[in-house]
Image (cartoon, rainbow, N blue to C red):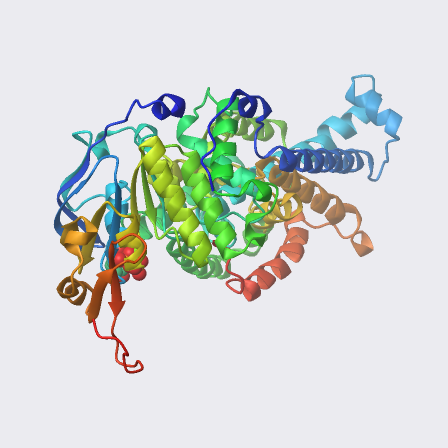
Amino acid sequence: MTVVKHTDADTRSSRAPSAPATSRRRIVIALLGLLVVVLAALSVSVGAYTLTPSDLVLTLIGQGSGSDNVIVFRLRLPRVVLGILAGAAFAIAGALFQTILRNDLASPDIIGISGGASVSAATAILVFGASGAIVSLSAFAGALVVAAAIYLLSWRDGVSGYRFVLIGVGVAFLIQSALGYLLTRGEVKEVSQALVWMVGGVGGAKWPDIAVLAGTLVVLLPLVAALAPRLRVLQLGDDTAGGLGVPVEATRLALVGIAVALCATATAFVGPIAFVAFVSAPIARRVVRDGSLALVPSALVGAALVVAADFLAQHALPGELQVPAGILTGVLGAPYLLWLLATTNKGDRSA
Amino acid sequence: MSRERLQGAEPAHTLEADGLSLAYDGREVIGDLDLTIPDGDVTVIVGANACGKSTLLRGIARLLRPSAGIVRLDDRQISTYPAKEFARVVGILPQSPIAPDGITVADLVGRGRHPHQGLFRSWSSADGAIVADAMAATSTTELAGRRVGELSGGQRQRVWVAMALAQDTDILLLDEPTTFLDVTHQIELLDLLAELNHTRKKTIVMVLHDLNLAARYAHHLVVMAHGEVVATGAPADVLTPELVQRAFGLESHIIPDPVCGTPMVIPIGRFHRPAPISY
Ligand SMILES: Nc1ncnc2c1ncn2[C@@H]1O[C@H](COP(=O)(O)OP(=O)(O)OP(=O)(O)O)[C@@H](O)[C@H]1O
Ligand SMILES: [Mg+2]
């Protein structure tokens, strides 16, 4: 083994080390992007009145007929756009949690943060008879409070992923019983309103909601991008990251804060659509499989999941049955959760 | 950068601990410890399992906040350095780093460049050259495109060392860098570190379990027991049967290493065939 001296030839031939992996990632991103576009076009076109592709294009560029305009811009497009934004927000929130805490179970919908939103929204609906924006705000606040509580409860000279997840799962159970209590005490009509909210879906999409969610993403995603290099180093373990000059606790707190804000905002508008945060990043990472954060592929998987679930929930169920998207994502996510619980710790991935 | 160093411009750093105490959850593991890392030398820390070697290394790498006392780099308390500035001078290879699922060798080694990059200074050709250099030095160049999870334990360990080298610090701390390595690769790795120390004047501090290799490669030996330093100095001055007894609870003979004359510890143990030779 010899120590190679730097030469100009070395310098010229050097390239970013992850180049081959990057090209695979690009292909995956392109394909997933295409999938989201196709699903969105289908969702906007298909329904009681089905638009032809040319009608759709004409309407989107402002040349559509009056009725087409109403169908696209008032009825169908808001659902799709809200679904894409919320799906992406859930997916990135999940990806951040799972990476920071190094545990695939550590997504906000498993560790009680979405549950915090539900309990708070259900309280607003059942106890205070609230609706609309108040419910959204309560949900947002509930998610923040529960996240802060879990963070503080699991703090002991720093936060370990394992403790965070265990405490989070405990909190999730606590929240389930609180929800059960609220629902058994409520009035039938309000209980059904709360139940629909708790399943989660994009049925109530309105452009002002979409603007708020989009604004949140515009503020938070650049922060995620700025912290991504640190997160890539944190993937190697706390000690390695600290040794490479990453302030571990501060970075973790900042990223948890961003992830909670993403998840809480999305939940406020669409409810806790089950398992989207939980499954998106693992699916994306399994496809990309290059050790990268895969945040963009995860966001696209999340968007595709919500749009597809909403489309199927509206059109594909037997007997003209229409249900919120969260029922379908729940059907997809629950078996994955079982599988993950059954296989966790069988293979040790650390070096 | 390192080119100037090769031509003899020697980096001079002081790294020292003063009354250092380190604790986990209030349970003290190391108490009131003084230690000076000699600049430009290879320092090897030895001691029984759980005596606090990794903890000490983490303390001087500022991964663990002292419960008392201070650690200084160049006469300045290490906690006052900006994180990346410190990481450009002191690097550490921890005992159990984690490789993300699916990561390639080249990507992993490249992440060692983190402290040299910033929001406005991303991957440069100089980074590429240093990474290529680190991989060549550890014989991992052929593995560049392979996934870390699919390597043998020894190959993986060399990849981690390559990542630590890519960080390109004047002081390098390594926690048991020879674990998982077969005897040839152990010697190769230690030779590499000795060479880096010799040609690039890098200060090396490492934890080793093999006392004979420690004695052979260390300029400066630090022997620990129960969270305290029980002896420091040149291996030939430090390693005695009494010390081995005290630090490891092991009865031994010490003879000169036939290759380089450094002390060689021959453990006695309870079960062995009758010795044909007496020392
Ligand atoms: N993260 C931690 N939290 C709590 N206690 C710890 C932690 N890490 C180490 N310890 C304890 O501190 C003591 C010293 O551990 P340390 O890892 O420093 O030993 P070591 O000398 O490196 O041992 P080894 O040779 O086995 O690597 C042990 O009693 C250990 O149980
Ligand atoms: Mg150790």
Count of marks overlaid on the render: 0
Residue at (45% x, 47% y) in the render: A120
Horizontal and vertical percent for residue B232? 15, 50
Asked whether the viewer can see residue A119, the reply is: no
Q: Position of residue A67 (x, y in %)?
A: 82, 25
Q: Is residue A61 left or right of residue A94?
A: right
Q: Which is more toward the observer, B251 or A238?
A: B251
Task: Give residue A71's position: percent from left, percent from top.
Answer: 78, 30
Q: Residue at x 53, y 45 (%)?
A: A94
Left/right placement of residue A227 relative to residue A63 reads: left
Question: Which residue is more in the foreground, A247 or A168?
Answer: A247
Please name whichever residue, B259 or B75, is drawn nearer the observer in this view of the structure. B259
Give percent across and percent down for residue B231. Answer: 14, 54
Q: Is residue A95 shown to the viewer in this render? A: yes
Residue in the foreground of this view, choosing between A67 and A214:
A214
Task: Please determine whether, in this image, residue A101 is positioned above or below residue A6.
Answer: below
Which residue is at a point 49% across and 56% down the rendered structure image?
B153
The residue that appears at 18% across and 58% down in the rendered structure is B239
Where, by quadrant of the figure, is residue B72 drawn? top left
Horizontal relation, residue A81 to residue A190: left or right: right
